[in-house]
Image (cartoon, coloured by chain):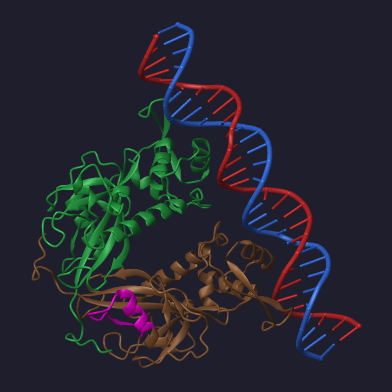
Chain colours: A brown, B green, C blue, D red
DNA sequence: GATCATAGTCGTCTGCCTGACGATAAACAG
DNA sequence: CTGTTTATCGTCAGGCAGACGACTATGATC
């Protein structure tokens, strides 16, 4: 097929973000309230149009910064001590997913440590961290009526895909450390796994696994007692990004 | 951001296909020769524009049918006895990846059994199955000069991503059966793994693993001798799509 | 037809990893 | 001082994978 500039239908291309964090023992996602029709007043994933001169990952990083203030690191940006992990998730392009026009959305997945200031202040009217369980509960019932409505557009599916990606990827990679601050304890890392998977893990076997995998955790020498109990060793994420053999979730 | 129809830049959206098969003990990909500028005469991945009224997966299935005659089954189309596995791979949208205009390409991965008729006869001038090793060898040297040039656009990276997806996904899923005809032997399945991973596997341990995983293989009762040697039992793919525990590739 | 080459299939053995769980250590709250 | 909490080390049995021996059933070759 020759590339006739008039031969292709024009699309709008957006990035949508599944931003996950662990707060109070629960896996939470960032949701913004829509100020415009359609789905006015409903909760949605943050996102926006890709600009003419930017890459898809740049657009996602820009939206992430606008909504959360987080700097992102991903495939093309090496990891720093602060900032969130960012990776492409999947692309959604059903005709009719947006009633106004043909929109193709390249969804991205971002993983962030619990934010010191949960101040999402972008162009959205309001934003909040909500447990993914609440956001995905169809016809769900939150504490108030506002939370009951399902997410706008096909964002429930996008969120579900992002959560599943995170759940499976921490099995065989060091991605769970993206939910932790730069220095963390084995127990804090374990609580991340427990929140993401929604299960309880044996602290002794977990400790053996993560400390026994070479290159996964590097002791910093310090200790902390911020969880109460006996002081725990502090670690930072090591260079190993792949966990071999993987740590499989307990059977369903 | 309000959705002002004039506020977003228009994009062209295409689907590109990484179609993989196993031929003569090698993992091969479908490549088409470009008949138009830019990259005229160079090899590229098959693909085309997404139409105004079709879903991304539909567009990929249509392109696959045009190029290979294969019917696809994927997330939204249940598996049939014939046809190829189709799934979304990733989306590539660098500004400048196409010198003529802003194009976002949603790449898809298709896995097909060795085709009875390798007759790719779509709109491309010519098409061929080429070992991925040859296509990815930068400044590679094939039998003839034509094969030496790298793939057009960013298609080498897309192909590499697709190959890596296939290599990793057969570890923990039954996807390798997508490379096999409806009925196949354990040895044929093992040769698929060997070709995709580029390693030699122990036939006895492989046999134990795949026949010992419940729901993975279902014996049909028949036997075949098409490989020479002692007749082998014929199987078809069972209902299990996930392989637990996974079959990990030998260490690098 | 005997022999050989080729594949397929069944076992055995050993070492590693995991899940279950006991025991000890080091902090804090009363 | 005692109980509670969390961290960390050890032990043990079962499961699984890699290495590899043995046997079986075909076709090819002499």
* Residue found at x 23% / y 86%: B3
Query: Quick one: quadrant of the C terminus of chain A?
Result: bottom right
Does B97 appear above or below B146? below
Q: Is residue B213 left or right of residue B155?
A: right
Please check the rendered image and state whether residue A131 is part of the magenta-colored stretch, yes or no.
no
Q: Nearer the viewer, residue B160 or A172?
A: B160
Residue A22: image location, x then y, percent: 53, 79
Q: Is residue A70 left or right of residue B182?
A: right
* Residue closest to the eye, B55 or A78: A78
Side of B35 relative to B181 (left or right): left
Residue A132 visible in the snapshot: yes
Note whether A3 is above or below A143 in the view shown. above
Q: Residue drawn 29% across and 41% down?
A: B114
Identity of the residue drawn at 45% across and 91% down: A119
Q: Position of residue C16 (x, y in %)?
A: 64, 51
Establish if B149 lies above or below A123: above
Q: Nearer the viewer, residue A40 or B48?
A: B48
Q: Quadrant of residue B94?
A: bottom left
The magenta region covers A43-64
Q: Nearer the viewer, residue D28 or B211?
A: D28
């Amino acid at each position: 097929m020759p590339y006739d500039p008039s031969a292709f239908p024009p699309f709008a291309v957006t990035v949508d973000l599944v931003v996950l964090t662990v707060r109070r023992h629960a896996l939470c996602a960032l949701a913004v309230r829509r100020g415009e029709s359609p789905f006015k007043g409903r909760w949605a994933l943050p996102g926006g149009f890709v600009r003419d001169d930017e890459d898809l990952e740049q657009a996602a990083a820009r939206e992430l910064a606008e909504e959360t203030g987080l700097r992102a690191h991903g495939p093309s940006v090496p990891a720093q001590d602060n900032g969130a992990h960012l990776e492409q998730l999947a692309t959604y392009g059903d005709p009719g997913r947006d009633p106004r026009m043909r929109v193709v959305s390249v969804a991205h997945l971002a993983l962030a440590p619990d934010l010191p200031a949960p101040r999402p202040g972008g162009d959205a009217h309001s934003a909040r961290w909500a447990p993914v369980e609440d956001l995905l509960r169809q016809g769900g019932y939150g504490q108030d009526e506002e939370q009951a409505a399902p997410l706008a557009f096909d964002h429930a599916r996008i969120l579900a895909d992002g959560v599943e990606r995170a759940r499976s990827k921490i099995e065989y990679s060091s991605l769970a450390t993206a939910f932790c601050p730069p220095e963390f304890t084995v127990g804090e890392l374990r609580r991340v796994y427990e929140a993401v998977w929604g299960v309880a893990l044996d602290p002794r076997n977990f400790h053996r696994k993560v400390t026994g995998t070479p290159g996964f955790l590097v002791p910093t020498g310090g200790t902390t007692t911020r969880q109460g109990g006996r002081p725990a060793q502090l670690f930072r994420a090591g260079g190993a990004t792949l966990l071999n053999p993987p740590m499989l979730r307990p059977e369903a």
